[in-house]
Amino acid sequence: MSGRNQISLWTMARQRLDEVAQLMHLDPRIHEVLRNCKRVMEVSIPVKMDDGSIKVFIGWRVHHNLARGPAKGGVRYSPTLTLDEVKGLAMLMTWKCAVVDLPYGGAKGGVICNPTELSDGELERLTRRYTSELILLLGPEKDIPAPDMGTDERVMAWMMDTYSMNVGYSVPGVVTGKPVNIGGSRGRREAPGRSVAICVEEAASRLGIRLEGAKVAIQGFGKVGGVVALLLHAIGCKIVAVSDIKGGIYNPNGLDPVKLTAHKRQHKTVSTYRDGDFITNDELLELPCDILVPAAVEGVITNENAEKVRAKLIVEAANGPITMEADSILRDKGVFIVPDILANAGGVIVSYFEWVQDIQQFFWTEQEVNDRLRQVIRRAFGEVWSILRDRGIDMRTAAYILAVSRVAEAIRMRGIYP
Ligand code: NAD
């Protein structure tokens, strides 16, 4: 299920595709291809636990569509993971790669487990066995996983090493989001937050929102939200609220993200920060502010609270933070939404840069990475904006039309085999 929303991410992803297909008069034969995943692999993963027992975990790797290139998508470790969630996220990856014009198809994977309850050794054995079970699918020309919720650089290093041990030589390009000294890219960690911040700038300049002093509320102060706060603060925005799973903090005069980052490092939460008032995550979404950045989990803005949102601009840093009903309520209210598939695409864009650098064995400076990321996001934003203006539609629908038309065109040109 997607957060508090009752329908699964897969159902939601399909409904969004169906709506867009109708609007763009998509060839029904291609629509049918896109409504389905190309392949789903389910694996059982026996792991020797530290106490001597053996526990079997269930995992998946899903390829949604590979018409535009090899499979790309994260690996999620979560106790509540379902196949529908993985399939929905795989479809989302197809659109995300297409909207920013990367030569990839959409994929996603994951294992039902709670990584915080596993020892380092158990997590490593689980990751290595999961990778071995997927070995037929993986490879730099076939399927290139990356981190997602519950996985990180360390897990990617184990995946890369396991694949390399199986083939007999080092293959850094088989995963992205690796540590820099084994073939990771500079700037990868900050990339999703950086693309969100660039989208805030692009949207604000077109909507006439002055960023100097603009009030910003950010839900989720993690890898993405924390970077968004630092970058927007650096360009003059006032960060009035931030939160994490334990709750948030509000100060209408502005918070200092550098101090918040230090506080979080020391206390593992921002909710106990002194320089502001404690608020709940629900209250954060309804605060008086110019820009709202949901950067935590999916399904947080629903038909129950959408009416109370007061921001003029929402930039989706998290995947799927707004339910479909909430989306239309916000649209009717005139709230401008930059969708997740564009806003947080910085992660997969710099993953693409990492893969290119690994294949060429030629590494870029952080400035080169950041400059190229800005170029890609600005170009994609401009292309989506033109569709929005020409058709008089919202940004999410425009982004989907661009993405779906690119994938549909690739299928049409390649033809259906045999
Ligand atoms: P993270 O785990 O680093 O941070 C998540 C933050 O959200 C933390 O502050 C956590 O405490 C908070 N949180 C968790 N559950 C919450 C809840 N129920 N209510 C309020 N806050 C809650 O994760 P991240 O990498 O920053 O990812 C955040 C979102 O961005 C996810 O939707 C993820 O899919 C998306 N995303 C991440 C990347 C990436 O490369 N990290 C790329 C694209 C999209």
Image: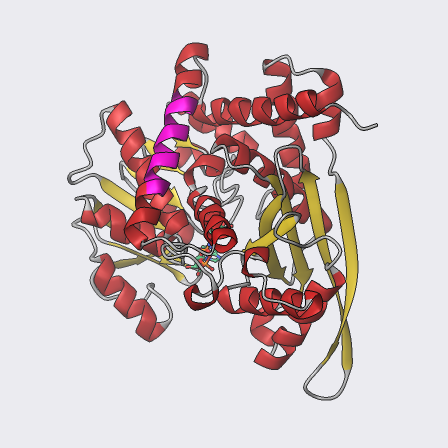
Question: Relative to residue 174, is residue 221 drawn left or right?
Answer: left
Q: Is residue 202 above or below residue 227?
A: above
Q: Residue at x 67, y 21 (%)?
A: 413
Q: Is residue 114 magenta?
A: no
**Residue 326 percent across, percent down from the top left:** 50, 32
Q: Name, please, the residue furthest toward the bottom.
A: 51
Q: Residue at x 61, y 81 (%)?
A: 121
Q: Report which quarter residue 216 is drawn in.
A: top left
Which quarter shows the C terminus?
top right
Q: Residue at x 41, y 32 (%)?
A: 338
Question: Relative to residue 237, is residue 154 drawn left or right?
Answer: right
Q: Main secondary structure of the magenta part?
A: helix
Q: Report which quarter residue 22 is drawn in.
A: top right
Q: Is residue 376 magenta?
A: yes
Magenta highlight range: 372-385
Residues 191 and 336: in front is 191
**Residue 343 percent across, percent down from the top left:** 42, 38
Q: Is residue 9 visible?
A: no
